[in-house]
Amino acid sequence: GSRDAATRALRTDLGLSPRGGVDVADLTVSQRAEYECRMAEIAQEWPLVDVAMFVDHIDHAVELIGIDHVGISSDFDGGGGVEGWNDASETLNVTLELVRRGYTEEEIAKLWGGNLLRVLREVERVAADMQR
């Protein structure tokens, strides 16, 4: 099982759309109490990921393939899903965790777009060569 599957099952049990939305407000008081209780159980069984856990994955990718091949991106449509990085205003928390772990300014710049820009420049160069 997973947190998402358990949440979808709970919502279905209560007659709500399994994918979420604002319809929780339409629940009766007793349904709302059941929802809150079961959501607390779900949160206990499948805790949310935090910034440190997210950076653990960055560390792992860097160890596997090297700093020059790893990048960080985000998509906050519907929430971030990472405690401490729930929206763009909390992005600094990821950088702070990287600094705490000893990443240099140059390495952090690579992760936050430098690697992507390097690859895009190389793709443009190859494309231009192919046009000749």
Image: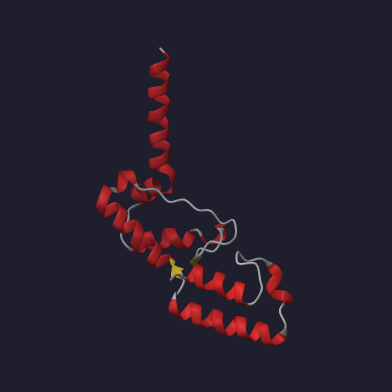
Who's the residue at 60% across and 76% down the image?
Answer: 13
**Vertical relation: 123 (above or below) 1:** above
Residue 88's place in the image compared with 4, above or below, is above
Q: How many marks?
A: 0
Horizontal side of 121 relative to 42 (left or right) equals left
48 sits left or right of 68 in the view: right
User: x, y percentage for residue 118?
Assistant: 38, 36
Image quadrant in which you'd find residue 121: top left
Which residue does the image show at 29% across and 57% down from the upper left? 60
**In the rendering, at what x and y percent does residue 3 appear?**
48, 71
At x 43%, y 48%, the residue is 112
In the picture, which quadrant includes the C terminus? top left
Residue at left 51%, top 73%? 6
For the residue pair 87 and 21, the one nearer the viewer reads as 21
Comparing 24 with 49, the one in front is 24
Horizontally, residue 24 falls left or right of residue 106, namely right
In the picture, the quarter occupied by the N terminus is bottom left
Q: Which residue lies furthest to the top in this view?
A: 132
In the rendered image, residue 117, in percent from the top left (x then y), is placed at 43, 37
Q: Where is residue 11 in the image (x, y as percent from the top left)?
A: 61, 73
